[in-house]
Image: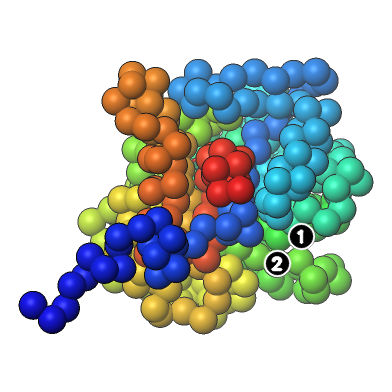
Amino acid sequence: MIRRNRILRQSAAIRAMVAETTLTPNDLIAPLFITEGSGIKEEIPSMLNYYRMSIDHTVKEVKELWSMGIKCVLLFIKCSDELKDNKGTEALNPNGLMQRSIKAIKDACPDMVVMTDVALDPFSSYGHDGIVEHGEIVNDATVEVLAQMSVSHATAGADIVAPSDMMDGRILAIREALEQNGYTKTGIMSYSAKYASCFYGPFRDALDSAPGFGDKKTYQMDFANRREALKETLMDVEEGADIVMVKPAMAYLDIIREVKDAVDVPVSAYHVSGEYAMIKAAAKMGWLNEEKAILESLTSIKRAGADLIATYFAKDAAKLIS
Ligand code: PBG
């Protein structure tokens, strides 16, 4: 035997020297759920130790994340039922919860990169990502609202808008709307290959945004498909996406790698709510070591090709890395 592979595994020091993938806080995007009111910090039942917070608590959280080396937050809003309608009118309110949150975070922590979710579902009386007509989710009318919503977030101070809806043509429409309104420095992170996944269940609890009828399979992708992910992603890059995303992450590591090999923009992956919940539940039962599961999961997502990872474990991971 002239080649002994175990030589490079024999001590922690050697393993660290030859490790091919290193996770850093710069890789992490922390999603935040924001709710109306003040002094509110409520745990999401299906997402242990994850909270919906009012703006005051959110601002504190953002400062803490920044002090831990995390550079980016991704904002989601829980809209109250009275404000929901079919067109997501509240999403465009210049004084809406999202717009106020962006301003408050930018005032308190100006260097934090603020990304905002762009989709109608939290604001939709139907819980769908688009406008509903005759039981169908209509594309082009929805895209118009998404473009206006993006401009509204940019006006409030968002650095990067993140359309998560999977309508056709929305990246180009958003880019044009940003240009027309003078927002030439606002980025777009496109949820390019977003699959219709059961792993979003706990997120829909967090925002009370589950679809009221049907499912999301006419706009989100079929999990049986691989080529389609490349088609979607390449089109989004052509339309002007600055960052593309694959979502969910761990059941789609093959897609992350293929996308990474196919595009010349940064690739992000969303380690979604159901992936978080599975680890949390198993750890609570004593069936998994939570810290090890977090590091192994996130490192595997980065190894697959993700430059950025949106994860509810961002804070835990930043602690574990340091
Ligand atoms: C909605 C949206 C969803 C997520 C992010 N944006 C849910 C959905 O598409 O139904 C899921 C995130 C998660 O599960 O963590 N546009």
**Quarter of the figure that contains the N terminus:** bottom left
In the displayed structure, would residue 123 be above or below residue 237?
above
Per the image, label 2 sits on a secondary structure element best described as: strand
Residue sitting at 13 percent across and 81 percent down?
2
Question: How many residues crowd around disc 2 within 10 Å: few (fewer than 14), some, or many (20 or more)?
Answer: many
Image x and y of residue 11, in percent:
36, 58
Per the image, label 1 sits on a secondary structure element best described as: loop
Image x and y of residue 285, in percent:
33, 19
Q: Mark 2: is the Cβ under 8 angstroms from ligand 1?
A: no
Residue sitting at 44 percent across and 47 percent down?
295
Disc 2 to disc 1, C-alpha distance: 6 Å
- Can residue 192 be seen here? no
In the displayed structure, would residue 124 be above or below residue 72?
above
Residue sitting at 34 percent across and 38 percent down?
198
Residue marked by disc 2: 187
Residue marked by disc 1: 159
Image x and y of residue 155, in percent:
85, 56
Circle 2/circle 1 CB separation < 8 Å = yes
Inspect the image, locate mark 2, and give the three-letter code of the amino acid beneath it.
Answer: Gly
In the displayed structure, would residue 49 be above or below residue 128?
above
Inspect the image, locate mark 1, and give the three-letter code of the amino acid beneath it.
Answer: Asp
Name the residue nearer the viewer: 288 or 239.
288
Image x and y of residue 31, in percent:
61, 43
Question: How many residues crowd around disc 1 within 10 Å: few (fewer than 14), some, or many (20 or more)?
Answer: many
